[in-house]
C-alpha cells in the first residue's frame, strides 16, 4: 500500500516543477539545479546549525540571465535568496523552502583597476582578497578585510556591511564602496551611489549596504582603493586580568591613537589558536591584545612608542613588537585563524557578533564568564576590541538538541546583555535569521515598522530574502511573552524562524 501523500511535499514538488519549467529556458545547460544531491551544498551558510534545501538553485553567467531569473520569479511570486560564497554567519543566505537560491558565484571578474581614481570595478562574486591582489601591482589595496576574505565575495560584504581588523582605522564596507549596480526584485536595473564622492538625492547606497540581500541584488560594485602603507608593525601585549585588558582598549583610543588594528583574545581562544598555528602567544595571559600601527617609518615608530606606553600604564605584563614582516604576520596568524581553531576544539561553534561601547568591554566579558556557568557551555572570545565588536564563540555539539537549545539561549543572552550595556545586536555579521528575536529587544515596534516600510518601498511583494532581518509583529509579541522584566529570557521555547 502506498504511504499517504504529504501535502507539504506535494506542494513543494508542484512548485518546483513550475519554477524549473519557467527558469530552464533562461539559463545555459547545467546552470539550474534542483535534485537534492545537487542542492544540498546550498542548504546552509556559515551558521551550520540551521539548514534548508532550496527549491532550485540558479547559477546565471550574465546580467541578462540574472534579470530574466528575477523577472520570472517575480511573475510567479517565488522568493529569491541571493548567495555569494555562503560564508555568512547569521543565516542570511539560508535558502527559502519554496524559493530560488540565486548564486552569484560566476560573477567573478575584476573589470577594471583605475590607479588614478584609486578605484576598482568588480563583479559581485569577486572574492574580497582578490581585489587587493589585483591592485597590489599599483601599490594599492582594498581596506575592509574580513577574516574570511580568502573566500567571501564583495556582494556578500556589501549585503552584510562587513568589517575586519583594519576597519577601525579605514572604515567598514560602507565607507569603502562608491557605487553598486544591480536589479530589484522585479528584475529592473537599479544603481546606488556614483563614481564621484557623493551622489544627489537620498543616500540609498548606505541603505542598500547592510540590507542583507533584501532590497536588491548587486551585480557590479565600484570600491575605493587606498595606498599600501610603507610599513606596518604589530604589538602583542599580555594581561593577567580581563578587566585591565578591556579598560586599556578604551585608554588607547582616549589617548588619541587610532591603531590600524586593535584586537583581543581571551585565554581559551589563545590556547586554541596557539595549538593550531603556533603564533607564539603567551599561554599564561588571561587576555592578549594585538595593536597594529601603519604609515611611514617615522609615524609607525612614534605610534608604537605611544601605544606601548599606554599598554604598560594599563598593566600589560609583557609586550612584544614585531621586528619584521614575517613576525607581524605570525602575530596575526593566530587571530586570523581563531574560527577554524575553535572548530578543532569543539564539534560546533556559534559565533555571536554584538557591539558594545568600548568602555564596557571588561563588563561584558565578565558577564559572559557567568553565562558559561549558567548555560553549562564553554565560550572562547575573540574580537575587534577597538570597534567594541565582540565575537564570543559558544562551543557546543549540534547533534545534541539540548546543547543547541542552551547555545541559542546563551547567544540571545549575550546579544541582549549587549543592548542593556548600550550596544547593538550586530556588529558586522548581520541579523539574518540568527538575531531575529533579539531585534525585538533592540528596537521598538515603531522602529521595526519603519524598517518594514523601507522593505516595502524596494520590494512590495516581499520576494527578496523574505523572513530575514526584520521580525514580524507576531514574532516580537511571542518573544516578548518569554522575557521577564529586565529583558532576561524566561521561557525555554524560543520562537524559531
Ligand atoms: C571563518 C569566518 C570568518 C569571518 N570573519 C568575518 C570578519 O572578520 N568580518 C565580517 O564582517 N564577517 C566575517 N565573516 C562572515 C562572512 O564571511 C561575511 O558576512 C561575508 O561578507 C559574507 O560573504 P559571502 O560572499 O560568503 O556571502 P553569503 O554568505 O553568500 O551571503 C551573505 C548575505 O549576502 C547576501 N548576498 C550575497 N551576495 C549578494 C549580492 N550579490 N546581492 C545582494 N545580496 C547578496 C545574501 O543573500 C546573504 O543575505 C566570517 C565568516 C567566516 C566563516
Image (cartoon, rainbow, N blue to C red):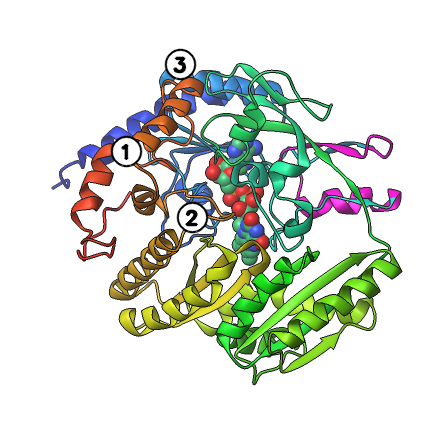
Magenta-drawn segment: 114-138
Query: In the picture, which quadrant includes the C terminus?
Result: top left
Compare marks 1 and 3 and give the one earlier in the sequence: 3
Mark 2 residue CB less than 8 A from any atom of ligand 1: no
Residue at horizontal 78%, vertical 42%?
Answer: 226
Q: Residue 396: image x %, image y %?
A: 36, 67
Q: Which residue is mark 3?
A: 75
Q: Residue 354: image x %, image y %?
A: 44, 53
Q: Name the quadrant containing residue 96.
A: top left
Q: Is residue 148 above or below residue 330?
A: above
Image region (quadrant) for ligand 1:
top right
Residue 124, magenta (yes or no)? yes
Q: CA distance from mark 1 to mark 2?
A: 16 Å
Horizontal arrangement in the rendering, residue 249 relative to residue 300 (left or right): left
Q: Is residue 464 above or below residue 241?
A: above
Q: Secondary structure at mark 1?
A: helix
Q: Which residue is mark 2?
A: 424
Q: Is residue 59 visible?
A: no
Q: Residue 416: image x %, image y %?
A: 33, 53
Q: Name the quadrant containing residue 256.
A: bottom right
> Which disc number belongs to residue 435?
none
Q: CA distance from mark 2 to mark 3?
A: 38 Å
Q: Is residue 293 visible?
A: yes
What crowding class fits label 1: few (fewer than 14 Cα within 10 Å), some (14-19), or many (20 or more)?
some
Q: Name the quadrant containing residue 403.
A: bottom left
Of 271 and 201, nearer the camera is 201
Query: In the picture, which quadrant includes the N terminus?
Result: top left
Residue at horizontal 68%, vertical 73%?
Answer: 236
Of 339 and 14, nearer the camera is 339
Compare marks 1 and 2 and give the one earlier in the sequence: 2
Residue at horizontal 53%, vertical 74%?
Answer: 244
- Residue at the far bottom: name it: 284
Amino acid at each position: 500500500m502506498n504511504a499517504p501523500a504529504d501535502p507539504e511535499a506535494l506542494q513543494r514538488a508542484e512548485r518546483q516543477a513550475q519554477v524549473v519549467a519557467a527558469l530552464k529556458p533562461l539559463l545555459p545547460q547545467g546552470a539550474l539545479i534542483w535534485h537534492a544531491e545537487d542542492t544540498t551544498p546550498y542548504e546552509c551558510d556559515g551558521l551550520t546549525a540551521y539548514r534548508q534545501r532550496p527549491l532550485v538553485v540558479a547559477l546565471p553567467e550574465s546580467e541578462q540571465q540574472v534579470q530574466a531569473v528575477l523577472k520570472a520569479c517575480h511573475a510567479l511570486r517565488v522568493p529569491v535568496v541571493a548567495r555569494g560564497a555562503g560564508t555568512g554567519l547569521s543565516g542570511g543566505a539560508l535558502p527559502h523552502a519554496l524559493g530560488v537560491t540565486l548564486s552569484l558565484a560566476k560573477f567573478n571578474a575584476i573589470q577594471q583597476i583605475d590607479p588614478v581614481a584609486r578605484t576598482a570595478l568588480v563583479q559581485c562574486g569577486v572574492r574580497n582578497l582578490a581585489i587587493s591582489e589585483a591592485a597590489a601591482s599599483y601599490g594599492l589595496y582594498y581596506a575592509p578585510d574580513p577574516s574570511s576574505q580568502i573566500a567571501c565575495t564583495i556582494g556578500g560584504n556589501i549585503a552584510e556591511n562587513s568589517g575586519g581588523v583594519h576597519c577601525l582605522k579605514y572604515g567598514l564596507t560602507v565607507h569603502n564602496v562608491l557605487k553598486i549596480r544591480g536589479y530589484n526584485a522585479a528584475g529592473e536595473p537599479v544603481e546606488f551611489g556614483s563614481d564621484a564622492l557623493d551622489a544627489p538625492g537620498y543616500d540609498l547606497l548606505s541603505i542598500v549596504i547592510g540590507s542583507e540581500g533584501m532590497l536588491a541584488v548587486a551585480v557590479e560594485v565600484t570600491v575605493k582603493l587606498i595606498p599600501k602603507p610603507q610599513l606596518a608593525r604589530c604589538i602583542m601585549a599580555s594581561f593577567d586580568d580581563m578587566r585591565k585588558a578591556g579598560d586599556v582598549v578604551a585608554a588607547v583610543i582616549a589617548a588619541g591613537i587610532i591603531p590600524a588594528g586593535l584586537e583581543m583574545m581571551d585565554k581559551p581562544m589563545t590556547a586554541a589558536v596557539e595549538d593550531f598555528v603556533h603564533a607564539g602567544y603567551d599561554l599564561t595571559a588571561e587576555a592578549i591584545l594585538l595593536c597594529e600601527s601603519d604609515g611611514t617609518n617615522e609615524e609607525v615608530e612614534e605610534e608604537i612608542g605611544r601605544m606601548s606606553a599606554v599598554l604598560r600604564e594599563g598593566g600589560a605584563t609583557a609586550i612584544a613588537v614585531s621586528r619584521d614582516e614575517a613576525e607581524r604576520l605570525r602575530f596575526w596568524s593566530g587571530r586570523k585563524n581563531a574560527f577554524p581553531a575553535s572548530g578543532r576544539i569543539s564539534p560546533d561553534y556559534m559565533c555571536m557578533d554584538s557591539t558594545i561601547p568600548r568602555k564596557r568591554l571588561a563588563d561584558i566579558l565578565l558577564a559572559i564568564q557567568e553565562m558559561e556557568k549558567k548555560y553549562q557551555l564553554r565560550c572562547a572570545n575573540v574580537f575587534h576590541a577597538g570597534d567594541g565588536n565582540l565575537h564570543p564563540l559558544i562551543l557546543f555539539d549540534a547533534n545534541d538538541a539540548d546543547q543547541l537549545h542552551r547555545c541559542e539561549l546563551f547567544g540571545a543572552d549575550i546579544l541582549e546583555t549587549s543592548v542593556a550595556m548600550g550596544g547593538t545586536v550586530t556588529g558586522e555579521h548581520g541579523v539574518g535569521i540568527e538575531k531575529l528575536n533579539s531585534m525585538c529587544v533592540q528596537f521598538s515596534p515603531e522602529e521595526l515598522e519603519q524598517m518594514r516600510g523601507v522593505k516595502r518601498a524596494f520590494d512590495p511583494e516581499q520576494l527578496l530574502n523574505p523572513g530575514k532581518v526584520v521580525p514580524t509583529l507576531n514574532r516580537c509579541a511571542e518573544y516578548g511573552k518569554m522575557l521577564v522584566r529586565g529583558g532576561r529570557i524566561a521561557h525555554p521555547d524560543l520562537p524559531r524562524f
